[in-house]
Image (cartoon, rainbow, N blue to C red):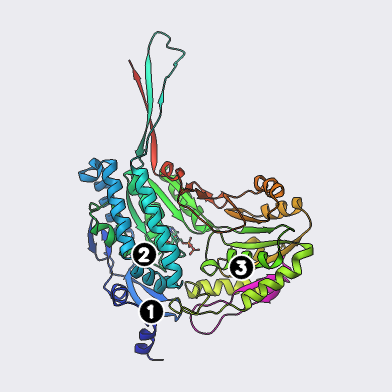
Amino acid sequence: MSEAQARHSVFDGVSAAARAFVERDHQLFIGGEWVAARGGETLSVYEPASGECMCEVPAGQGGDVDRAVNAAREAFEGGEWSRARPVERERLLLRLADAIEANADELAEIESLDQGKSVGMARNLDLTMAVDFVRYMAGWATKIDGRTVEPSVPYLPDQQFTGWTRKEPVGVVGAIVPWNFPILMAVWKVVPAIATGCTVVLKPAEETPLSALRLAELAASVGLPAGVFNVVTGDGPGAGAALSGHPGIDKVAFTGSTEVGKLIGKAAMDNMTRVSLELGGKSPVIVLDDMDPQAAAAGAAQAIFLNHGQVCTAGSRLYVPNREYDAVVEGLAGIAGGMRLGSGRDPEAQMGPLVSKAQQERVAAYIDSGRQQGARVAAGGGCPDRGFFVEPTILADANHQMRVVREEIFGPVLTVMPYQDLDEVARLANDTPYGLGASIWSNDLARVHRLIPKIRAGTVWVNCHNVLDPALPLGGFKQSGIGRELGREVVDLYTETKTVLMSI
Ligand code: ADP
């Protein structure tokens, strides 16, 4: 195929607006202006279904990060942002939500081209959730408050005091996000920062930088003051490390792998930078024996195959009672074997490609290791020739000695294991360094309630999996992270508590 033909097929069926955005000359967004990266280097952006390069973005480096952090500092400390009242931040965010909603179709296409997911899913899930979350956080801007306290100060009995607490913005935030839900992950960090009165430098993932740049453009169009929201595209070791270790930031907010999260946490600690980490997972899906095997298989398939398995809470370990085991594996093999692979713009496709060649190779290597360690491939296991696809894969008869059970794969690969009783399944579910999510599938209320407190995970779903709401916190136990995003808890991540004690 010639390059011209390949480029044509990449943009087949895509709106002129989305194509024009992808093909434009991309720059960094710093201090309210579009600027070139100082070093002039670029990163190629690939369309995952074809593997074709669509465009280049600047590969920002330390000097660019410096510039962005300085712009964010200036906006935080002086000028109109520090004087903006909560209600003004609320209205700005409501306008931003409207702007994202008005451009959601185009953003969904950009996300699909860049990440590989279907336009329909990007529109219905990623963009709907992003808009909802911006509105939810807009509401918080006017509801941040402290407490009044009547202090006793027992060692100064002759004096009188009053005391109260203030929630103040933490300052300049460095936000580093991954490639699985690019705009949603960006919004989850940038918007709480804005709602609380912080300023922010966002570094999107090198694989999926485009929607962050469009988001910055929309934020500027609704009147967000210069320097409040900056975007530096670039890779992890360059731009990412420069941002997370920058002495000029007050907080780093990261979502990504546990491996990189540990590096970021250590770098942050050198400057005592506040840090929140939303990291990897290996979430168990626990079927109890009152479940119909077909319903269990359908639920487990959804838990693993959403976003092609590239979800930090993906249900990647399935535990089935001995008696139902064969029927559930058979049901899953039928579902996975019948899924049609295709580009994110193919309305018939039930699963798209993975985000990159590197991710495809990583997932394929895990499948091989599962085979070598004795798992039975009940469905899938292969990679089609073109693009970055991996077949939906069921690895049956797995066990806890296997790497595919112990390590996060971040692809459409489900491991399935039988169990005997509730105590055993609780022990197996917790036999992991991770603790992000878990689901229990049963209508036996008493056993569900007995199991929930035993599971060491930040979220336990019952008869559903991967379902999120802006009002409910999300985060990890153990090596799945530190801190809770979403819900009222997110306000704490972006504020410092100041105590005031007054002698009266
Ligand atoms: P994934 O495994 O999902 O690719 P990563 O943790 O590698 O996740 O990447 C998530 C984000 O972290 C990306 O924006 C990436 O550029 C960034 N990143 C990777 N390495 C580093 C690093 N050493 N320091 C800071 N950020 C990094």
Can residue 327 be seen here?
yes
Frontmost of labels 2 and 3 is: 3
- Horizontal side of residue 70 vs 440, given as left or right: left
Magenta part, dominant SS: loop
**Where is residue 133 drawn, in percent x and y?**
40, 53
Q: Residue furthest bottom?
A: 1
In which image quadrant can residue 102 be found?
bottom left
Front position in the image: 178 or 343: 343
Mark 2 vs 1, N-terminal side:
1
181, 266: nearer the viewer: 181
Asked which secondary structure carries label 3, the reply is: helix
State the quadrant of the C terminus: top left
Residue appearing at x 53%, y 70% in the figure: 308
Tell me if mark 1 has few (under 14), some (14-19) or many (20+) residues whose alpha carbon lies within 10 angstroms of its own: some
Residue name at image x 24 percent, y 45 percent: 81
Q: Amino acid at mark 3?
A: Ala
- Of pointers 2 and 3, the one earlier in the residue sequence: 2
Tell me if 497 is positioned left or right of 227 in this view.
right
Q: Is residue 457 magenta?
A: no
Give the number of the disc on residue 301.
3
Disc 2 under 8 Å from ligand 1? The reply is: yes
For residue 222, the mark is none
Q: Residue furthest left?
A: 79
Q: Give the magenta range.
A: 371-398
The residue beneath circle 2 is: 234
Q: Are marks 2 and 1 in contact (CB under 8 Å)?
A: no
Quadrant holding the N terminus: bottom left
Image quadrant where residue 147 sits: top left
- Look at label 2 and name its amino acid: Gly
Which quadrant of the frame does ligand 1 lie within?
Answer: bottom left
For residue 53, which numbered disc appears in the image? 1
